[in-house]
Image (tube, grey):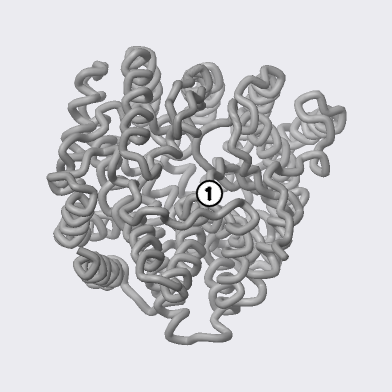
Amino acid sequence: MTNTYPEVWELDSLFSGGSDSAELRTHLDATADKLADFEQAAATFGVPKRTADAQQVAALLEKTSDVSVDLRQAGAFIGCLMAQNTEDKKAALLQSEHALMRSRFQSAFLKFKQALMETDPNVWSELLSTEDLKEFAFILDEWRQEATRLLSEQEEGLITSLGIDGYHAWSELYDLLIASISVQVDVDGEDKTLSVGQANNLSSHQDATVRKEAYDKLEAAWGEKEELFAKTLNSLAGFRLQMYKKRGVDNVLEEPLQMNRMKQETLDVMWQAISEHKQPFADYLARKAQLLGKDQLAWYDVDAPVVENSQSFDYAQGSEFIIRHFGEFGPELEKFSRHALKNGWVEAEDRAHKMPGGFCTSLPKSSESRIFMTYSGSMSNVATLAHELGHAFHTHALKPMHDLNRSYAMNVAETASTFAEMIVADAAVKNAVSKEEKISLLEDKIQRSVAFFMNIHARFLFETRFYEERKNGVVPANRLNELMEQAQEEAFAGSLSEGHPHFWASKLHFYITDVPFYNFPYTFGYLFSLSVYAKALEEGEGFEEKYMALLRDTAIMSTEQLAMKHLGEDITEKGFWEKGIALCTKDVEEFIKLTAEEG
């Protein structure tokens, strides 16, 4: 008998009462008091002059951690409220209140970092060797380096303050625009009013008429509001570029590379390897077009199933499917995921007024996570659920570490999530009971390669080119459409008959202010996780402990150091990336062989 897994997440154990929560109000008030104390401590913190000042630094580190944990706990909960119901106006007010508190924290934190920056280099080395601080050597060095790239305390404080109702407000406006959109689509003979997230899920519908109607209706919606989206994107980007200019930064990739703790040469060689090996994936798209009776695929065909009556999983079946295959990798991942799924950590229900997309958020004070998605029964949904559970497991693996040593970068975050996806996808293909099922599951694996090597590449190309043009002034909506289509044409190697011109309006990732260039880390994580997965297959039982050790190191070293320590690989070399791409190419070869036998 299949176990029951709740499809609506459980939030009351965090703060009962939703956006009216008295517990949340108490928590925010207490956090405000701690924040005021932290601001005072940071303002009076003196530049360390001798080794004995290590205790003073350690004391302020603990205050930093304490306030940060409380802020992140509240922020994650409020984010959950916003995601589950885009019409929750009280949650939006709480989000604004939290943003102001976070801004105050960042300003005080900056004072702390600047004092560390001014420390004499010899004293600094001695401080980091003390018992009080050696555990935090990596992040303290990182903070010190960050401070050297910033403006004065007053100027950075002004940027942070103006960002609340400027930079970040544009991002919040995007959320409101998305929430205002719904479309009517005829699905299996029933006229349905769908949110953006629900309509996006129809991209994998068996019926081409349904896929095209959903795409056309959404494209019309984006087109109708394109000037609003263009204004939002241009304003957000303009703020970011002016901030970079004041800091003397010309390369828009400088900040995202620093945030991802990776070198420019690593990023360049990764995209070079991908660009030189697009042909197998173009061949896959061409073969898929043949199977669907088309000369070329349109954008709305890319996610279409090629096998009729492809397997569908209700939420409980999908959950059991994931747990079973996670168990083949290791007992800790299986135990953790079962606990998360059975205890309401996941919001999966397919209903109106939810935000589109999916995410995993950490609640550090509760030592829990929450996962958000809209589940409609496809294998792609199962993969998304496994992906987000991978994020949650990463946070779980970091529990033994001090909170300040848990801030891993997005690229290695995507390593854990795509690794979890791979476990499920690979095991599913191997255990397929029929050729049709194997084709369907194999294609789902290949679809992820297409997403990371083509779709994400298109986003990266668009965003880099958009920012270069934005330096010279506002980029109008029609030009944004052109840039998007050009990027898709290049990234998909000319494999599509028509692209998605308003993709720049439809994709949340372009509007996230906390993480610029929310694209290339996905591809990095995918290929990096392939190497980790290959090592797991090679070593077999017992690798889970080594995997968790790798995850624990993700927040205390650069990606280049992480790869060398745990994989023995130099990721600035093209050969590293080509090995991962070659594994994906094998899936394409098998797919073409199996479907040729079908035809």
Q: Name the residue: 33% across, 16% down.
A: 226
Q: Is residue 447 left or right of residue 331?
A: left
Q: Is residue 493 left or right of residue 26?
A: left
Q: Name the residue: 37% across, 18% down.
A: 221
x then y, percent, for residue 403? 68, 55
**348 or 251: which is nearer to us?**
348
Let me know if residue 414 appears in the view.
yes
Type of amino acid under label 1: Gly
Q: Is residue 337 left or right of residue 596?
A: right
**555 or 61: which is nearer to us?**
555
Q: Is residue 126 above or below residue 43?
A: below
x then y, percent, for residue 311? 47, 57
User: Mark 1 Cα within 10 Å, few/some/many (few <14, many 20+)?
Assistant: some
Which picture quadrant has residue 10?
top right
**37 or 298: which is nearer to us?**
298
x then y, percent, for residue 586? 26, 72
x then y, percent, for residue 464? 25, 37
Q: Is residue 196 above or below residue 316?
A: above
Which picture quadrant has residue 576?
bottom left
Q: Is residue 118 above or below residue 52?
A: above
Residue at numbered disc 1 = 377
Q: Name the residue: 58% across, 67% down.
A: 552
Let me know if residue 242 appears in the view.
no
Q: Name the residue: 57% across, 62% down.
A: 137
**180 or 491: which is nearer to us?**
180
Q: Is residue 395 above or below residue 256?
A: below
Q: Residue furthest front?
A: 189
Which picture quadrant has residue 446?
bottom left
